[in-house]
Amino acid sequence: MNKLALLLPLLALAACGQEQPAPEPTPAQTVTAAPVSTLPAPDREHFAEAFAAGCTGAEPVKNATCKRAGMGSDNVVCQYGLGDDEYLRHTATMGPNADKTGWVLTDAATVCTEHGAETTETAASESQ
């Protein structure tokens, strides 16, 4: 009886070592998202380009700093100085253009009239 008690655990242990390995999991196909066009981070150069494109005849932008208008907002608020002014005295809001590849002034008419310049749309309609 004593030998039988010792043999049973050995047989159980030997049976455990002969299990067949689990089948390899099949790799799941991953779906890649379509590429989303991202806007470049707004800086002085982007604001200067948008300001020059929106306002004809205005002084050039000397310095500018931009930050998001709020959490999740597409718009940015920029403070800027024109000409020889080294201080950020003025504020404008920029938003993405139609194809979301660049920045444009959201209220170009107000910003341009503040500086005595014409908006691009006004200058184009007067030349016709």
Image (cartoon, rainbow, N blue to C red):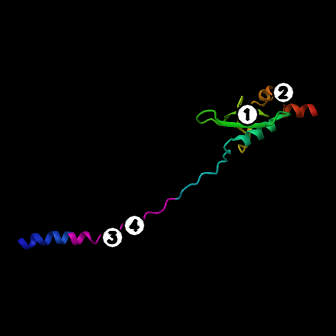
Q: Position of residue 8 (x, y in %)?
A: 14, 70
Instruction: Say whether residue 34 is left or right of residue 98.
Output: left
Q: Which residue is mark 2?
A: 116
Instruction: Specify the farthest residue to the left.
Output: 1
* Mark drawn on residue 23: 4
For the record, the magenta segment spans 13-28
Q: Are marks 1 and 4 in contact (CB under 8 Å)?
A: no
Q: Secondary structure at mark 3?
A: loop
Query: In terms of sequence position, does the residue under pointer 3 or pointer 2 come before the other?
Result: 3
Number of marks present in the image shown: 4
Instruction: Say whether residue 5 is left or right of residue 81.
Output: left
Give whichever of 43, 70 is nearer the camera.
Answer: 43
Q: Which residue is mark 3?
A: 20
Amino acid at dot 1:
Glu
Q: Which residue is mark 1?
A: 86
Residue at position x 86%, y 34% from top? 57
Residue at position x 11%, y 71% from top? 6
**Cα distance, mark 2 to mark 1?**
19 Å
Query: In terms of sequence position, does the residue under pointer 3 or pointer 1 come before the other?
Result: 3
Instruction: Specify the farthest residue to the right.
Output: 128
